Amino acid sequence: MENKGIWRDGLVRAFHPKYLFSDLFDVSGGKRLYLLFLLAIQLVSFFVIFSNGQFHLQVNPTIINMVSLLAAVTGVFSVVLVANGRITNYFWGVVESLAYIYVSFDSHLYGEVYLNLFFITMDFIGIYQWSKADHQKNQKHTEKVISRAMSVRGWLLLTISILVAWWLLSQFLLRVPFITPQLDPHPYVDSMSTVLQVFAMILMAFRFGASQWTLWNISHIAELILWTVNFNPVMLALWIAFSINSIYGFYVWTFKLTDRTNQKKEAAL
């Protein structure tokens, strides 16, 4: 019965329209300007066209561009809200992942497809974990999550796991296509960005702070390389926005959302 209550409270808090929009509108002052700045980057990129070696600004309402814009806008909502410890980030994350899967499949970046299928699963695990933390602290419907720190031993195990997973996934992408017969054109970069974000998402679901944002920041470099080679200005703008937000998220989760009195107790991974 307790698990049902955790699920119910978590899903209501993450998906109910009342909270979805109140969390967005509750962003005030400098944070509101920050959100608008990230959204402006996405909207400007929507009008960028690259042809004959030159950039142009014009309306290009193709299906892939519209879906890219949907992924970009909901992605900005998601990362800004998670940086502020708001559980509604998971709703926007689900919408972003569905749109991102479509764009990635169109570019044959199958690591990105697998990654976002994983993200959708982890979004629901994250909802449960964040809601469970609220129940354990007797702070039902709390607005912000308390982050945890990772031990040195945890960092060592994490690094080894990332390297092994990267090699295995790159070998898989080199040999196995997804639905279509065409292989991933950039298996090593794609697998690196995928693996880093898989582990970052796991750390986020279990409320680890600085460690998850370190992985997000490194993975964003790989993503910028990936979408520069497979040129998509909206996706590039999205990852530029994500990179900016990761720096902000690292600061917030490390210095604002950390319960330092319980840090040692929660540090073990």
Image (spheres, helix red, strand yellow):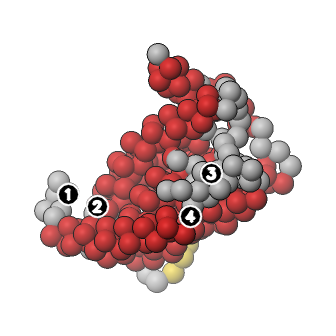
Residue 167 drawn above or below residue 149: below
Q: Nearer the viewer, mark 2 or mark 4?
A: 4
Of the two numbered discs 3 and 4 on the same chain, state the one appearing first in sequence: 4
Q: Nearer the viewer, mark 4 or mark 1?
A: 4
In contact (CB < 8 Å): disc 2 and disc 1: yes
Q: Residue at 67% x, 66% y: name it.
A: 247
Mark 1 sits on what residue? 178
Q: Are marks 1 and 3 in contact (CB under 8 Å)?
A: no
Where disc 1 sits, the SS reads loop
User: For numbered disc 3, what is the local secondary structure?
Assistant: loop
Q: Is residue 267 left or right of residue 120?
A: right
| Quadrant assignment, res 199 | bottom left
Within 10 Å of the Cα at label 2, are there few (<14), some (14-19), or many (20+) other Cα atoms? many
Q: In the rendered image, which residue does mark 3 sit on?
A: 265
The type of residue carrying mark 2 is Tyr
Which residue does the numbered mark 2 point to in the structure image?
110
